[in-house]
Image: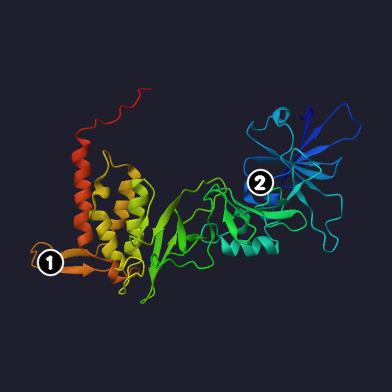
Amino acid sequence: MLIYSKVHFAMVGESLSIRLHDPNRDSPNQLEFVQYDKLAGDFPHSLLYKTIILFNDELKRLEFYPSRSGWDVSRMGNPQYIMSLEMDPSQEYFRPKLIAVSADPTIPSFILCPASDVVQNLSKLLRPLEELPINLRVAWKPANDAFYLAYNGFTLDISLPRYKLSFFIGTQGHFESRELIGLSISPSQIIGTLLGPDSKLILDSKEGNATRQNVIVPSGVALHSWDGVHPRVLIDIPQDAGKLMHVHVYEVDHILKRLVPDATLKSWYQLAYLHILTSSHQLDPLLLCNGLEYGLHMLRSAYSYGFSELGEEGKEILGFILNLCPVRLHFPRHIEIMESVSWNPNLSPLSQSDVIARIVEAILVYAQDQAVFYSPKKTKKK
């Protein structure tokens, strides 16, 4: 636990320098706070977010402390990570080591720099979920289990902190998921449907002659475009380091020819939305129909009405689906004899249908009828 009692403030150029000094020692300025922007880009975001970083002048190292207790230095405890700077960083081929402090300091694990070739290549593999390498946390750690593929007793551990997902290299050399046990990143990112979205990660596992597959799609606003031939869908993923991301996990059912969402209504609506956005003139090999037909089938089903109260997230996705309809206006407006139709140029005409409006409006009317049985939440008086 840190017991430094004297704090010195000084301006170095346009930057504020904050140093801690232990009056019981002769060495001055033993610890100095390091600003976040000085290290941004060289470390994973998850290590810098809500973290106090100190430079220990006596030990020549950076110390990373979790900042759950704010700026109360006396309550920070032991550093979570340390980075030794004993060698001269200007020397050729020198790379400082960022060490994850563990219960056994004789067997440390190392965090790799986002600029390293290993992290850059892993970022290409996980780009559907995380576009920037700095949002990954790749550790070179001891392989204490027989399930890991080890090299000199060490293995790679890949984490996506914002998604609370992690992967490791299994004995067969595949990137296996810790959360979805038995599944690993598939070398083929094609499942026979959702052929447009770039923001999806497919996991699979070979079990006998059957193939188990899951699709991970991040939750967010779908940005769609159309080049005249193929639709393209990209989920707008915020890059804020502190933004926790939610994902939808869909299971591929090869028997009933469909994707199976989780038990939430949001996941159901989001899947219908993506099917409509990726509709084509050809049948999806998995669904045996095009995306628009299957999306409308989902919206017509009883599951779309399986709620007692439609939440804001459900209304938002239904609003996105409703915006896929072509806009029809009477021309001239006061006569209502002719009408003009406006088609979205960034969306395939095969995804734009007037039938969508009738189905979505029926769901919204049902939600209004259900609201009669539930009184609005009372707000507390200040």
- Residue tagged by mark 2? 47
Residue situated in front as seen by the camera: 31 or 163: 163
Q: Which amino acid does label 1 sit on?
A: Pro
Tell me: 31 left or right of 208: right
User: Hey, which quadrant is residue 224 in on the image?
Assistant: bottom left
Q: Residue 332 carries which label?
A: 1
- Asked if residue 266 can be seen in this view, the reply is yes
Comparing 51 with 304, the one in front is: 304
Which badge, 1 or 2, comes first in the chain's sequence? 2
Which is closer to the viewer, label 1 or label 2? 2
Q: Nearer the viewer, residue 284 or 378?
A: 284
Quadrant location, the N terminus? top right
Horizontal and vertical percent for residue 6?
A: 79, 28
Q: Residues within 10 Å of mark 2 (few under 14, many from 20)?
A: many
Location of the C terminus by quadrant is top left
Regarding residue 219, the answer to whether it shows in the image is no
Residue ID at (68%, 49%): 145
In the image, residue 326 sits, relative to residue 368, either above or below, namely below
The percent coordinates of residue 304 (x first, y second) are 27, 49
Q: Please give left or right for residue 87 compared with residue 303 in the image.
A: right
